[in-house]
Image (cartoon, rainbow, N blue to C red):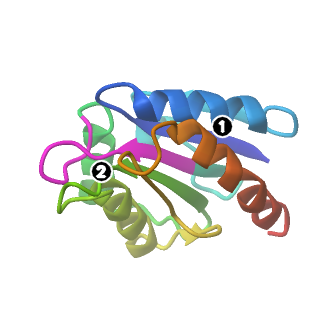
């Protein structure tokens, strides 16, 4: 199974998490990390799985590097009924918009027909100073559910 790791990061935390997750996945999967994702370059036919790893910026906004991709999905509204995906959302519970970008990405993909594998992971910077550790604890269960597909 090939995995497209789509990263949204402003200050680098989501990139660090994505790097650690990628290293763990490489033992069994081909992984391509996308810091500037473009829908035209991604497979939506079920041959690839998308794993979104994004922080939340501002008042619940997508980070600058993933915002064009999310806008592209909203405008083009592709049929993603063959696509399976996962979401790792980073945020701070000090804000009302906690993990909003990850939640919005999750909802958008579902609205376009995609099927989420496992539960969305929400990492709270207040509770978890090392978000990579939380992601690596979550990853084995996500992989099991991926393999069961």
Residue lying at 62% horizontally and 41% vertically, measured from the top left? 133
Number of labels in the image equals: 2
Q: Which mark is residue 121?
A: none
x and y, in percent, of residue 28 in the image? 87, 39
Task: Looking at the picture, tell me which residue is in the foreground, 124 or 110.
Answer: 124
- Image depth: mark 1 or mark 2 in front: 2
Circle 2: is it few (<14), some (14-19), or many (20+) Cα within 10 Å? some
The disc, 1 or 2, on the residue closer to the chain's N-terminal end is 1
Is 54 a magenta residue? yes
Q: Are marks 1 and 2 in contact (CB under 8 Å)?
A: no
Hey, which quadrant is residue 110 in on the image?
bottom left
Overall secondary structure of the magenta section: loop
Name the element at disc 1: helix
Residue lying at 46% horizontally and 66% vertically, measured from the top left? 79
Relative to residue 11, is residue 143 drawn left or right? right
Residue lying at 49% horizontally and 39% vertically, measured from the top left? 6
Q: Which mark is residue 21?
A: 1
Name the element at disc 2: loop
What is the CA distance from the residue labelled 1 to the residue labelled 2?
A: 20 Å
x and y, in percent, of residue 81 in the image? 55, 71
Question: Is 116 located above or below residue 3 in the figure?
Answer: below
Instruction: Answer yes or no: is residue 37 visible.
Output: no
Hey, which quadrant is residue 19 in on the image?
top right
Residue hosting label 2 = 92
Relative to residue 114, is residue 37 drawn left or right? left
Relative to residue 40, is residue 81 drawn left or right? right
Image: magenta residue range:
51-63
x and y, in percent, of residue 146 in the image? 76, 61
């Amino acid at each position: 199974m090939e995995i497209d790791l789509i990263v949204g990061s402003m200050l680098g935390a989501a990139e660090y998490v994505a790097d650690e997750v990628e290293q763990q996945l490489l033992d069994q999967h081909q992984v391509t990390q996308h810091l500037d994702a473009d829908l035209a370059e991604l497979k939506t036919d079920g041959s690839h799985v998308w794993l979104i790893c994004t922080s939340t910026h501002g008042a619940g906004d997508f980070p600058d590097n993933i915002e064009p991709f999310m806008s592209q999905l909203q405008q083009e509204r592709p049929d993603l009924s063959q696509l399976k995906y996962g979401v790792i959302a980073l945020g701070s519970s000090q804000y009302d918009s906690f993990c909003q970008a990850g939640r919005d990405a999750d909802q958008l993909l579902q609205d376009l027909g995609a099927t989420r594998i496992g539960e969305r992971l929400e990492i709270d910077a207040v509770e978890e100073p090392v978000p990579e550790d939380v992601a690596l604890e979550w990853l084995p269960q996500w992989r099991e559910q991926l393999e069961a597909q």
